[in-house]
Image (tube, rainbow, N blue to C red):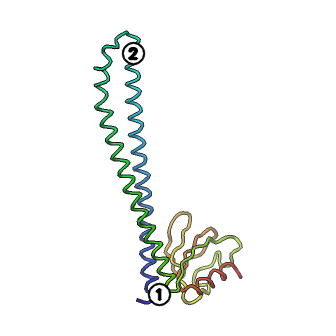
């Protein structure tokens, strides 16, 4: 497989990874929220225990303490098990993200071994290609603008895609051509 074919294939995988990563982060946020709710439920149960202890103390019924607390303990044990299970889910979801980072690093390494490169840059107000269509920019031959991130959304560009200030461009291709493209964009 040629370098260019590797780049095209790898980039497609990279975009899929970005999409998966967004989904993973949403999943992690949801799991963390569920963990937080379980923690709050545990706090409520502890408050119930404290309230019961105080009430029995005020009523001089300390002998009834063990009976009252035994009613709350099973619920507390159940919540603790739920909390441990949720923590394990979060850890498993986090580990998957580390695996994805490893694959992306391997992809970058493979590109570099084949004299390729992948770079990202943000288009600022001084950039000469801002507000131009991709097809109007004379990029070096072996460079691909693989993705544009605009306001948090990934765009797979075509020749009619207009480059805007604030866009984050992902360039990939042969190392020298990527470097030349960076100079072109910077106006050097």
Q: Distance between the residues labelled 1 and 2?
A: 75 Å
Q: Which of the two discs, 1 and 2, sits closer to the camera?
A: 2
Q: Residue at x 36, y 47 (%)?
A: 86
Residue 14: image location, x then y, percent: 45, 73
Q: Earlier in the sequence, mark 1 or mark 2?
A: 1
- Label 1 with label 2: CB-CB less than 8 Å: no
Q: How crowded is mark 2: few (under 14 residues within 10 Å), some or many (20 or more)?
A: some
Q: Residue farthest to the top?
A: 60
In the image shown, does 172 or 146 lie closer to the viewer?
Answer: 172
Is residue 118 positioned above or below 99 on the image? below
Residue 145: image location, x then y, percent: 54, 79
SS at circle 1: helix
Is residue 22 positioned above or below 60 on the image? below
Is residue 171 positioned above or below 58 on the image? below
The quarter of the picture where the C terminus appears is: bottom right
The quarter of the picture where the N terminus appears is: bottom left
Q: How crowded is mark 1: few (under 14 residues within 10 Å), some or many (20 or more)?
A: some
Q: Residue at x 61, y 84 (%)?
A: 136
Q: Can residue 144 be seen in this view?
A: no
SS at circle 2: helix
Residue 114: image location, x then y, percent: 49, 86
What numbered label is drawn on residue 4? 1
In the image shown, does 182 or 92 lie closer to the viewer?
Answer: 92
Q: Quadrant of residue 66?
A: top left
Residue 80: image location, x then y, percent: 34, 39
What numbered label is drawn on residue 55? 2
Is residue 68 positioned above or below 112 on the image? above
Q: In which quarter of the image is residue 71?
A: top left
What numbered label is drawn on residue 172? none
Left or right position of 34 against 66: right
Q: Which residue is drawn at 31% across and 13% down?
A: 63
Count of marks, rendered view: 2
């Amino acid at each position: 497989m040629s370098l260019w074919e590797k780049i095209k294939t790898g980039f497609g995988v990279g975009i899929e990874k970005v999409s998966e990563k967004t989904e993973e982060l949403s999943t992690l946020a949801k799991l963390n929220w569920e963990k937080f709710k379980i923690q709050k439920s545990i706090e409520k149960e502890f408050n119930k225990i404290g309230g019961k202890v105080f009430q029995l103390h005020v009523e001089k019924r300390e002998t009834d303490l063990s009976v009252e607390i035994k009613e709350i303990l099973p619920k507390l044990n159940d919540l603790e098990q739920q909390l441990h299970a949720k923590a394990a889910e979060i850890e498993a979801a986090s580990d998957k993200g580390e695996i994805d980072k490893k694959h992306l690093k391997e992809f970058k390494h493979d590109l570099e071994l084949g004299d390729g490169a992948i770079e990202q840059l943000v288009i600022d107000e001084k950039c000469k290609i801002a507000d131009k269509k991709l097809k109007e920019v004379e990029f070096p031959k072996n460079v691909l603008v693989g993705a544009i991130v605009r306001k948090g959304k990934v765009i797979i560009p075509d020749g009619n895609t207009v480059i805007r200030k604030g866009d984050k461009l992902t360039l990939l291709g042969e190392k020298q051509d990527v470097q030349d493209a960076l100079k072109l964009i910077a106006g050097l």
